[in-house]
Image (spheres, grey):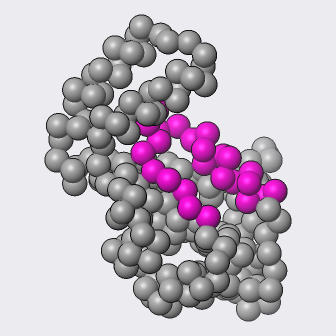
């Protein structure tokens, strides 16, 4: 059996984490880098990954996340926040980044940029947000796989009030909306349940 399948068989949604144990930073960095490298529609990566270690912030989030203990017992809380809309500025920034990374400007790629610019910004903002949120879920899947490979316990969560999390983290001012939270930590195996 492949190492990847073994890692995926190892993982499950951890319910109880040891609040006194921290995930090593190199493992968190690995997970974040895997998310950064995740494929998305049109290559736009229309979401941001926030890594929350501040306990006071995590306490505030727990209060609006059905009081789920993983939010404060984890060592790192990942928040996937999607763009609230596609704008020409955001689209151009991402296409420019790809050009800079590749070190070339490709005619076909530039034609595709124009097609995206002619399509996405004209759509309703809520439709664009929903599209961006689906892209964030691709990143969540990658984070779960990367965490399993690193043997870092995790729990994907939708059980929270997104508007309140957005307020706590000042996401609205940044043109973002929270989609999923993902605690990373060390399982308290002696009291956890599957």
Marker count (numbered): 0
Q: Quadrant of the C terminus?
A: bottom right
Side of 142 where 4 appears, left or right: right
The answer to whether any part of residue 133 appears in the image is no
Is 131 positioned to the left or the right of 123 in the image?
A: right
Q: Which residues are magenta?
A: 26-51
In depth, the one of 7 and 103 nearer the eye is 103
**Residue 156 locus on image (x, y percent):** 54, 68
x then y, percent, for residue 193: 66, 85
Residue in the picture at 66% in, 46% down = 34
Residue at horizontal 62 percent and vertical 58 percent from the top? 144
Q: Foreground residue, 12 or 153?
A: 153
Q: Position of residue 114 (x, y in %)?
A: 29, 20
Residue depicted at x 49% and y 48%: 138
Is 23 rendered above or below residue 111?
Answer: below
Question: In the rendered view, would you say 101 is above or below 66?
Answer: above
């Amino acid at each position: 059996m492949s190492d990847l399948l073994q890692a995926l068989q190892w993982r499950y949604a951890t319910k109880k984490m040891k609040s006194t144990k921290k995930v090593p930073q190199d493992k968190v960095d690995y997970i974040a880098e895997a998310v950064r490298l995740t494929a998305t529609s049109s290559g736009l990566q229309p979401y941001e990954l926030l890594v929350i270690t501040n306990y006071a912030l995590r306490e505030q989030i727990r209060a609006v996340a059905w009081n789920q203990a993983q939010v404060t017992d984890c060592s790192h809380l990942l928040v996937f926040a999607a763009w609230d809309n596609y704008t020409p500025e955001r689209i151009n920034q991402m296409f420019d980044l790809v050009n800079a990374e590749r070190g070339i400007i490709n005619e076909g790629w530039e034609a595709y940029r124009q097609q995206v610019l002619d399509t996405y910004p004209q759509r309703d903002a809520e439709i664009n947000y929903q599209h961006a949120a689906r892209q964030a879920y691709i990143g969540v899947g990658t984070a779960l796989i990367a965490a399993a490979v690193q043997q870092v316990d995790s729990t994907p969560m939708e059980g929270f009030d997104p508007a309140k999390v957005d307020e706590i983290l000042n996401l609205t001012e940044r043109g973002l909306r929270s989609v999923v939270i993902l605690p990373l930590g060390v399982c308290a195996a002696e009291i956890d349940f599957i």
